[in-house]
Amino acid sequence: MALSIKLVRHGESQANVGIVNTWEVGDHTVELTPKGHDQARAAGALIGAEFFAGAIAYSSPFRRARDTLDDLLTGARIDRSTLLHYEDPRLREVDHGYVSIDDQRAMQTKYGPFYYRFEGGESPADCYDRTSGFLESMMRQVLRVGAERVLIVTHGLTIRCFVMRFLHLTVEQFESMANPINGAVVTLAARETVDKPVFATGRWAVTGIELVSH
């Protein structure tokens, strides 16, 4: 089976530009900005209608992910009613807790970005665990319906956790990945079909991920 998975980070949100703070309003309620809607429609046009034929789509239940999926389909000129789609809470953003993230940066550095659990929230390692469970469920569904293409609309760190789990990357490789920009499209596919992969393991490779510059 020539499986291709495209992971899309939601468009620019009001939290991304400082209009709201997630720990004050509730992360799941944060809306896209006008630019974020444009980014999502552009990502849909980039992916194209052909990808969606017989595809399965999954999204985070957070508002900015839901709205991004709607805009993606608009950009790709796809009728939502024709798409097999599921929302999965395991695709939500990493929970940063109920206090300012900036106030926890020193602790995060001390205990490690992958391992530090935000106060009242979770760590990227926790996000990795739930993403692993999602991947197992997703693959069973892919095999059940014979799908060859999967779209996942989610959040930056969740995308990195998914790529880490899918390709069996190390913690150091996870930390070398930059957070995808808003509206970015990350592709996991057979190695021979991926031009200039960022990481490759066995027969699988990823492109669309940027590495942290030093």
Image (cartoon, rainbow, N blue to C red):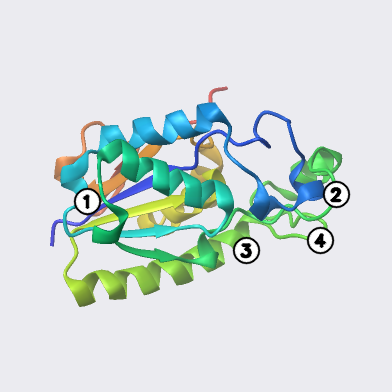
Inter-mark Cα distance, 4 to 1: 38 Å
Q: Amino acid at mark 4?
A: Gly
Inter-mark Cα distance, 2 to 3: 18 Å
Instruction: Point out the tag, 1 or 3, that comes first from the N-terminus.
Output: 1
Label 1's element?
helix
Q: Nearer the viewer, mark 1 or mark 2?
A: 1
Q: Nearer the viewer, mark 4 or mark 1?
A: 1
Residue 52 is labelled as 1
x then y, percent, for residue 161: 50, 53
Q: Residue furthest top?
A: 214
Inter-mark Cα distance, 1 to 3: 31 Å
Residue 141 is labelled as none
Residue at image position (33%, 40%) is 74
Q: Residues within 10 Å of mark 2 (few under 14, many from 20)?
A: some
Residue at image position (49%, 46%) is 67
- Residue denoted by label 2: 99
- Residue denoted by label 3: 126
- Residue denoted by label 4: 120
Instruction: Point out the tag, 2 or 3, that comes first from the N-terminus.
Output: 2
For residue 207, say whether it is visible: no
Instruction: Point out the tag, 3 or 4, that comes first from the N-terminus.
Output: 4
